[in-house]
Amino acid sequence: MKSTSTGSAGTMNPLRQKPRWQARVGTATTALLMVGLLGLVPAAHADQLDDQAAALQQQADNASSALEFVDSGIAKSASDLVLYQGQLPGAQAALADAQTRVGAATEQVNKLSARIDLAQQNKDKITAQIEMDAKKSLETKSLIGQIAAQSYKAGGLPANLTLLLGVGSTGDLANSIDLAEQATRSQTAVLEKLSTQKATNQNAAARLTAVEAEIKDLKSQADAALVAEQTARDSAAAKKVTVDKLISDSAAINADLEAKKPQIQAKMAVVQQQQNDVAAQIAERQRQEIEAARKAAQAEAERIAREQAANQGNAGYVPPPYVQPAPGNPSAFGLQHPFSGNIPITSGFGWRATPAGTIDFNGTGGYMHTGVDFGATCGTPVYAAAAGTVVIGGWTVYGGGNTVQITHGVIAGNALTTIYYHNSSVVVSPGQRVSQGQLIAYSGSTGNSTGCHAHFETWLNGVPVDPMGLL
């Protein structure tokens, strides 16, 4: 094998050329690592991630429900914006983690490359030493052959030994004997040298074998490290695409919402006025129902008092002023769930602060979600929560789509109305008397709705209350 320098054939040793995995280490290493990060979040366990995803989806649903009676397209945009902005920190953290893996894999490849270079240099040195030792062995063997040939021709003592050993005179026997002893010693020394050289050569060959095995193992490790590096790069590239898209989509949606803000606020004002009118109608009807119930209770109380007085012979008895009792527990209505199955709640009742990054459409930092949204699929049967009389059974103009509104009268001084919005169809009519659990509609996505669901409201004594406190 040839050294790193030009060999006898004048060619470069192919083992010294930069291998494919080493040549690729320096290309595009910093491209992904230069991505700017907007924020990082700590790693979380699977259950924590599930909780975070659920909380984010809840925020998106809340943002959508804020506009469900105004414009379904705008409502979806607001929901998407919340999702995208909420997903961005996690996507950026995943990108940072992938970039860290790229750096670690690249460092591993570089370290292996340096070790291979060092091992290759060691191999080249051993190879050169073996070539030199082989040349010396050939020279030694040649010398032994010459001594042996001359001794054979001279009958045991070489006639021209002086020529081989450099002795100046062979004139007498003593000198001849001395020359013979010198020849014997020289031959012995050369043989010993040859034996030592052979051992040296064997040791060098063993070292060369070990170095070659080391290089082979290092190259195998380097190939595996290169695969890991490429996998990390691919992962980082994919995650960067996700981050870029989230940023781009969020910016586009936000710009669109900002551009439409005057239009949305104008529509919101109209819808809000319509809803205020409905609320006023409900409040007035319930006031009248409570007043009628009060008068009926008063009349009944006075009738009973006069009847008791007449029975006691006091025909001119005048009952004292009627004192209306305090309202009782609303649970007396005994409301049942409007669905037969276990339908999940997608947005609850109550005040919703406008999520960060979205437009404050109401101008007050949030909005009041006056009902509960159930994630019912389209076509799910909807049942009356209690017995009552249908007030609305059909289409409404303020974004609720196909609507059912039922008044349940007054019980224990409380007036109750239930409302069911966004139905695909309604199977009852205004003025119709319905019983508890009777089929009244099928859920859907009519009106300003972003998808199949059921918006359910309960109005008690003129104001909306949380349905879950009554069911």
Image (tube, helix red, strand yellow):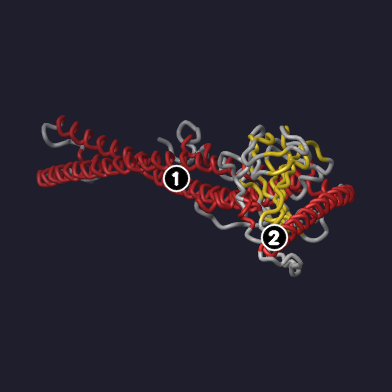
Give residue 159's mark: none
Please determine whether, in this image, residue 4 is positioned above or below residue 290. above
As shown in the figure, which amino acid type bears the numbered disc 1?
A: Ile
> Where residue 116 sits in the image (x, y, percent)?
44, 45
> Where residue 151 sits in the image (x, y, percent)?
15, 34
> Where residue 433 sits in the image (x, y, percent)?
71, 39
> Where residue 158 sits in the image (x, y, percent)?
16, 36
Q: Label 2 neighbourhood size at 10 Å, few (<14), some (14-19), many (20+)?
A: some
- Label 2 or label 1, whichever comes before in sequence order: 1
**Residue furthest out toward the front:** 313
As shown in the figure, which amino acid type bears the numbered disc 2?
A: Glu
The residue at 59%/42% (across/down) is 343
Q: Quadrant of residue 25?
A: top right
Q: Nearer the viewer, residue 190 or 130?
A: 130
Q: Quadrant of residue 460?
A: bottom right
Please determine whether, in this image, residue 40 is positioned above or below residue 157. below
The residue at 50%/42% (across/down) is 228
| Left or right: 471 as drawn, with respect to 313 | left
Give residue 307's mark: 2
| Left or right: 219 as drawn, with respect to 258 | left
On-image quarter of the N terminus: top left
Q: Quadrant of residue 329?
A: bottom right
Q: Is residue 422 visible?
A: yes
The residue that mark 1 highlights is 116
Q: Label 1 neighbourhood size at 10 Å, few (<14), some (14-19), many (20+)?
A: many
